Image (cartoon, helix red, strand yellow):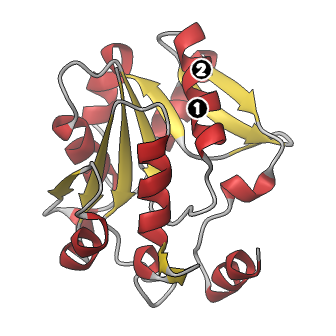
């Protein structure tokens, strides 16, 4: 069983607006990410909310997702990673972390990561475009649960990836658009154009 955890708790201070709620093709960005995750081969989907919890919940409440609130969202992304792991089913063998500001991820892309994970258990599956690592990232839970639950601050799971290069399975993907996220108004305008 593989669970998707969508990290949607941030304030988007760099953007100056709740980027997970920005409109894109008639619906909020978080809705795009959640629908894609639900259509993929993951077995369950958890959305971790924080700053804009009510608004995020309102946009996805009709989807087959579990919505949880991270009360420590101001302390950084690690708290949402931990909250997400604690919320997934105890039967989950892997967890795929998605960002709420990556609306161009596709079902095919996510399923490609899942297939690669199933052929290499105990790994960390990281997508790569032209040598550059990106997200979403998939962790084997029996192997990495303790390290994931011990994360603190705003670094997220990147620390584990950097500390264990021998366990990282890099998966090439040729469409750079799936890696695009929204950090600035310029990023948002580029995604709107696409």
Report x, y in % for residue 146.
27, 24
Locate the N terminus and report the quarter of the image it occupies: top left
Which residue is rendered at x = 41% and y = 45% of the image? 38
Left or right of 29 in this view: 189: right
Image quarter for residue 132?
A: top right
The numbered disc on residue 115 is 2
> On the image, numbered disc 1 is attached to which residue?
111
- Closer-to-camera residue (194/39): 39
Report x, y in % for residue 131.
83, 39
Contact flag, marks 1 and 2 (Cβ < 8 Å): yes
Report x, y in % for residue 138.
49, 31
Image quarter for residue 114?
A: top right
The numbered disc on residue 84 is none
Picture layout, residue 168 above or below residue 73: above
SS under mark 2: helix
Locate the C terminus and report the quarter of the image it occupies: bottom right
**Labels in figure, total:** 2
Which residue is rendered at x = 44% and y = 27% of the image? 139
SS under mark 1: helix
Which residue is rendered at x = 59% and y = 43% of the image? 107
């Amino acid at each position: 069983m593989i669970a998707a955890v969508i990290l949607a708790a941030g304030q988007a201070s760099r953007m100056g607006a709740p980027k997970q709620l920005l409109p894109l093709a008639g619906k909020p960005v978080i809705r795009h990410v959640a629908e894609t995750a639900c259509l993929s081969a993951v077995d369950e989907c958890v959305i971790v909310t924080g700053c804009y919890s009510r608004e995020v919940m309102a946009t996805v409440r009709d989807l087959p997702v579990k919505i949880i609130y991270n009360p420590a969202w101001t302390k950084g992304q690690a708290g949402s990673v931990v909250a997400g792991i604690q919320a997934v089913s105890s039967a989950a063998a892997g967890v795929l972390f998605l960002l709420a500001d990556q609306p161009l991820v596709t079902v095919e892309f996510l399923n490609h990561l899942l297939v690669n994970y199933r052929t290499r258990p105990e790994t960390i599956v990281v997508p790569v475009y032209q040598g550059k690592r990106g997200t979403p990232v998939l962790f084997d839970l029996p192997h990495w649960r303790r390290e994931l639950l011990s994360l603190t601050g705003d670094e997220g799971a990147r620390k584990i990836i950097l500390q264990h290069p021998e366990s990282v399975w890099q998966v090439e993907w040729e469409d750079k658009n799936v890696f695009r996220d929204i950090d600035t108004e310029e990023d948002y305008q580029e995604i709107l154009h696409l």
